Image (cartoon, coloured by chain):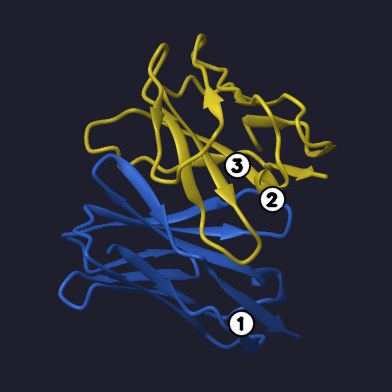
Amino acid sequence: SQKIEQNSEALNIQEGKTATLTCNYTNYSPAYLQWYRQDPGRGPVFLLLIRENEKEKRKERLKVTFDTTLKQSLFHITASQPADSATYLCALYNFNKFYFGSGTKLNVKP
Amino acid sequence: EADIYQTPRYLVIGTGKKITLECSQTMGHDKMYWYQQDPGMELHLIHYSYGVNSTEKGDLSSESTVSRIRTEHFPLTLESARPSHTSQYLCASSEYTTGSNSPLHFGNGTRLTVT
């Protein structure tokens, strides 16, 4: 069956460090992969999109990699700040639909 | 910021009642979606629409129904609410482009509690 796995344990890091979040998937052949941020009580907010033929995408302090051989995407936040604390979701686009992981909660401590 | 609006934000209702969750967007997006999300869990697609008069069921079986009479409006209706319907309901929209690589724009959700 199709599955998207994100680390269910919260990631706790110190301010200024780089946070790395993982998204693994099975039984998909996604054309695109997206990352979203979700704050408590709010809807997800789009951050970055990466295509299957792209290895890496950057936006300010954010970097996403996409390895279709490993079926994995890594999401990096450099120079993390307490304001980056949130749940981060990955989403795959496959057969006209978006499929979401359950997200990883990031806690950045001052 | 948010150009997609959901009402109500919170709803507590008794078993057997009929409810309609409202969703409107002002971006002119053709595609709209309803997702269901329980705490700490992934979003599950329950309905989507490619445009006016188009509605499709998602991958998660749902007893709800939707309609798309106007581009900007995509309401979700439960004819008879049950405690198992207690969840957060998120509405989203996106542009309808070739390959559909455009991101989803989400509302802030309706937290439904059925007692």
Give the quadrant of residue B57. Answer: top left
Percent of width and height locating residue A37: 57, 60
Q: Do the residues under discs 3 and 2 have CB atoms within 8 angstroms?
A: no
**Which color was chain A given?**
blue
Residue at 56% in and 63% down: B41
Mark 3 and mark 2: Cα distance apart in space? 9 Å
Of the two numbered discs 3 and 2 in the rendering, the one whose residue sits closer to the viewer: 3
Residue at 68% in and 29% down: B80
- What kind of residue is marked 1? Ala
Percent of width and height locating residue A20: 46, 82
**Which color was chain B given?**
yellow
Looking at the image, tell me whether mark 2 or mark 1 is earlier in sequence order: 1
Say which mark, if any, is on residue B90.
3
Q: Do the residues under discs 3 and 1 have CB atoms within 8 angstroms?
A: no
Image side of residue B82 versus residue A60, left or right:
right
A57 or B72: nearer the viewer: B72
- Which residue position is annotated with label 2? A42
Task: Check disc 3 and report its element: helix, strand or loop.
Answer: strand
B67 or B73: nearer the viewer: B67
